[in-house]
Image (cartoon, rainbow, N blue to C red):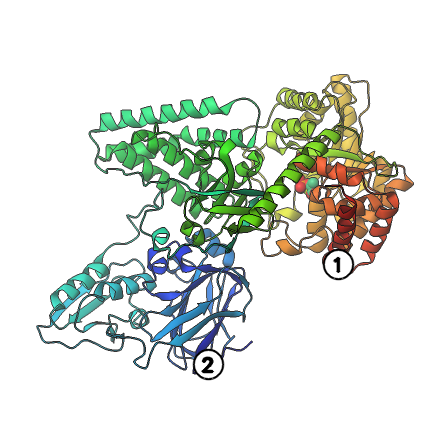
Amino acid sequence: MRATEGRAGLVLLSPLSGWSTPLDEVPDPVFAGRMLGDGLALDPTGTTLHAPCDGEIIALPESRHAVTLRSDSGAEILMHVGIDTVALGGAGFEAHVQQGQRVAAGERLITFDLDLIARRAKSLLTPILLMEGCGFAVVRSIESRELAVGDVLMEIAPVGEAGGRGGIAGPGEAREEGGESEIRRVTVALEHGIHARPAAQIAGALKLLTGEVRLAARGRSANARSTVALMKMGVHKGDEVEIRAGGRDAATAVNAVAALLTEVHGSDARPALIPPPGTAAQTAPAEVRAGSELAGVVASRGLAVGQAVPLAVHEIAVVQTGAGIEHETLQLERARSQVAARLQAARGAGRSTAQEIVEAHLALLEDPELTDSALALIARGDSAAYAWRGAIGDSIEALRALDDPRMAERVDDLRDLGRQVLLVLTGEAGAAPQVLPPEAILLAQELLPSQLVSLDASRLAGICLVAGGATSHVAILAAAMGIPALVALGTGVQRIHAGTPLLLDAEAGLLHVDPGADRLAAARRQLEIRAARLTAEREAAREDCYTADGRRIEVFANIGSLAEAQAAARNGAEGCGLLRTEFLFLERETPPSEAEQRAQYQLLAEALAGKPLTVRTLDIGGDKPIPYLPMPAEENPALGLRGVRTSLWRPDLLREQLRAILGVRPYDQCRILLPMITDAAEIRAVRVMVEEARAAIGRPEPIEVGVMIETPASALMAESIAVEADFFSVGTNDLTQYTLAMDRGHSELAARLDALHPAVLRLIARTAEAAQARKRMVAVCGGLASDPVAAPILIGLGVHELSAVPSVIPRLKALIRKLTMADCTDIARQALEQSSAEAVRELAARLAARQSEREPV
Ligand code: PEP
Ligand code: MG
């Protein structure tokens, strides 16, 4: 589609692929408060900014992080890639145009490094603004949608013949009035010169003042009311600027502008621990209408009906000046001990998700650097609360500066722990938690794990968050608690009144606001049916699983902790098809000893009450730094020392692990699974070590040794591998990544990384044929085994065992019991002939629909 310009206005095309988001969500009051202009923001998935219409580039700073375009009809459009990206000084940005150049709609303007910006900037949200005062207004904008480059983004139209400026002076004009004129020269102290934010602040400060105000520097002069003109001057830190104002308010104007130019931004600023009121949240306009729906991202699947309950939040007020070093040090110590005692009490036994979060908070609380840095601030005269907040803020900044996206979780932990200690320090910790009415659907800007666990879960039906990610700690916790949750719903959430009836569909990703009595009643019926079905399925899951025509299919569980082993037993797992032993090895300074490992494996074996336990040897590589396993730096860790390669590179670790597994009683409960196998020689090498370990501990019984089929090489070599291996377990997560050459953690490729791709299915089919020829058992333990839609295809391909996440086991068993082998082999044969994963999914969905017709509800 082309940008069209006519009497009715101008259509702006999306300059970037991404998710369109209301400006209110931009974490910067200048943008969220529309000080620069109206528009929306894009959460980019693409990396190139294109022209949204024909026009001329009127501003392009040296830092190349933003660009302003003037359309032929005079509309000025600012595109600002990310927030606080001026600080990158151009790193990660490449401009394809120059200031003054004409461009056509769709032409490339700037290319940027999405990863670098994600790591180093405050936010990736990219505001696309119609500049304040340019004489155009936004008529319609396409919000909360996935947009591709060139899709319609906004319609804009001129506001009246006078360019819409009404009685307010626009950038090109000045209010000439009598009075003195004022001139002042100042040296710019702004870290990044006059970029978008200070320009908006200067223009904003002058709004209520009369008279002309101009700035001059670098041989250029600009109307100080025009943000574009100010940005175009290209003023840097240290430049001398002349401020010249006329009219009645001249002195006030000069003072205001001088103050803004000489203010030191950034260096003293600490990230606010709790978002300050008065920013995005408070700019939210009118309430959300009954019958409307908000789209979000599913963080915890499920359906809920209930009433809106906004989370009660308040800013924790903190005074800066302390009452003496000794007093404040003692206060901090007391607060830390109080929080530590509470966390220790909540720690309990086992390793559930909540307990792991508590452990993370305890570890941070005991972090000497954090405490030392708070004490240093107290020694400077700060109060304990101010110092603690400062120390937490500094640590957050330091973590954000690391080039490691996994640190996002640590930042959340720090913020949460910071808040808990602050509440004690300010005497607010004892305050009663928010009382929830029954069937509460909680609405919040964000939610920290400690806030979630303080609420009465029996009254909490669902969670809706303005922001947040689907893999955050709070999302994982909500899923573990079985509470449906949607995140990234946008600021509409804040416009829903308390008590409004809500239908939360955390399956389709929609929040229905006051959807009417009929829909609510239908959803309640659906919930009752599901509850009854779940009870029946859980009950039936205790029995072994057979297809309708009597083929035995084992349904096992993947586990990575004792809590998961217990969940597996509760959900009717017939064994464990994959124990990821990494949990024992990560986040510690020394490797677990043989005795510690054996004790842990023994506990897990007992939790499974004698059912088979498949222990995978350590699957670790250069992507997960381990202090006691320093690895050579690798260009591409996914293709480097991983899985069995690491174990053979460090045989000392493998020997200890093998002895620990071999020591578990009863001897026939465990079997060994080797990750990342590519050929038979690797198995032979490990088998030699297994035999040595067996002799070392004096175990007479042999043990089964199976292999993960998760490299295309192992699938293609399955015949020769079957000679050495006792069983196969297909790891579809890695098999898909390596077959499709798509990184399994790549967010842009996530939708295409589908294990039902026919190429992956053909490798599984080949594996199953080779196994059958040697009478070996084939399991699937990758994510595909937990996808009920895939079960008939996998069974039809010849898979005997599915090892799934514990919670889906009852559903999976119920489904398999309705299948016949004829259904399965038929769909598997067709699936292999398809040309895409989508086509396979359609095929599987048709079978699932036929089955649900047969299903009694
Ligand atoms: C797999 O790759 O499918 C698998 C089960 O292993 P992991 O997800 O632990 O790499
Ligand atoms: Mg794997």
Label 1 residue near ligand 1, CB within 8 Å: no
Q: Which residue does the numbered mark 2 point to in the structure image?
A: 5
> Please, what is the three-letter code of the amino acid marked with disc 1?
Ala
Please state if 569 lies on the left or on the right of 477 as rendered: right
On the rendered image, what quadrant is the N terminus found in?
A: bottom right
Q: Where residue 312 sits in the image (x, y, percent)? A: 38, 39
In this orientation, which residue lies closer to the viewer: 534 or 271? 534
> What's the mark number on residue 839?
1
Q: Quadrant of the C terminus?
A: top right
Asked whether the beta carbons under mark 2 and mark 1 sit within 8 Å of each other, the answer is no
Residue 381, image x and y in percent? Answer: 22, 34
Pointer 2: residues within 10 angstroms few (<14), some, or many (20+)?
some
Residue at image point 60% right, 49% down? 745
Residue nearest the viewer, comparing 430 with 27: 430
Is residue 42 visible in this depiction of the protein?
Answer: yes
Left/right placement of residue 815 relative to residue 128 reads right
Please state the horizontal and vertical placement of residue 392, each as a whole percent of the image. 36, 38
The three-letter amino acid code for the residue at tag 2 is: Glu
Classify 376 as above or below 277. Answer: above
Hey, which residue is sitting farthest front in the picture? 517
Disc number placed over residue 657 in the picture, else none? none
